[in-house]
Image: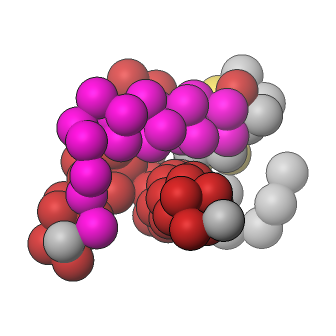
Amino acid sequence: MPSGCFKEQNNVCRRFPHMIETPQQILESSFRIAWDYLEATGELGEPDAAAAVLLDAIGTMMSRGEYRKLLLSNRAITAYQRRQAKQDFALVS
């Protein structure tokens, strides 16, 4: 068990046991962070397509065991930006 663990439960280190969030809450928070950022920067395009990309990116990472909200949201933003850049490049070509 890593140092700094305050509580062990089901072989999982809980550094902040009072701050435990469900996977659904983590997904929602990560999605909201990414959505708000894209909206604030003016990068948010068609809402249904944007939601699909963000949810797919976050869901894929969570299925691999990643639960850090900021990392999830940042990677989802990057996935969306790459998709948009690829679409823009296809339109220009």
**Residue 78, percent from left and from top:** 55, 65
Task: Pick out the residue farthest to the left.
Answer: 40
> In which quadrant of the rendered view does residue 71 lie?
bottom right
Q: Is residue 53 above or below residue 22?
A: below
Q: Is residue 51 magenta?
A: yes
Q: Is residue 59 above or below residue 30?
A: above
Residue drawn at x 36%, y 41% as measured from the top left: 50
Pick the residue in front: 2 or 44. 44
**Residue 28, percent from left and from top:** 30, 35
**Residue 42, percent from left and from top:** 19, 71
Give the magenta-colored segment's residue range: 43-62
Residue drawn at x 25%, y 42% as measured from the top left: 46
**Residue 11, percent from left and from top:** 78, 30
Q: Quadrant of the C terminus?
A: bottom right
Pick the residue in front: 53 or 13. 53
Query: Could you tell me if residue 27 is visible in this image?
Result: no
Pick the residue in front: 6 or 65. 65
Query: Could you tell me if residue 30 is visible in this image?
Result: yes
Task: Pick out the residue farthest to the right.
Answer: 1
Task: Pick out the residue farthest to the bottom.
Answer: 41
Q: Is residue 50 magenta?
A: yes
Residue drawn at x 28%, y 29% as measured from the top left: 48
Judge from the rendering whether residue 48 lies leftward or rightward of residue 8; answer left or right.
left
Task: Pick out the residue farthest to the front.
Answer: 93
Judge from the rendering whether residue 20 lies leftward or rightward of residue 71; answer left or right.
left
Pick the residue in front: 8 or 81. 81
Judge from the rendering whether residue 56 lies leftward or rightward of residue 50; answer left or right.
right
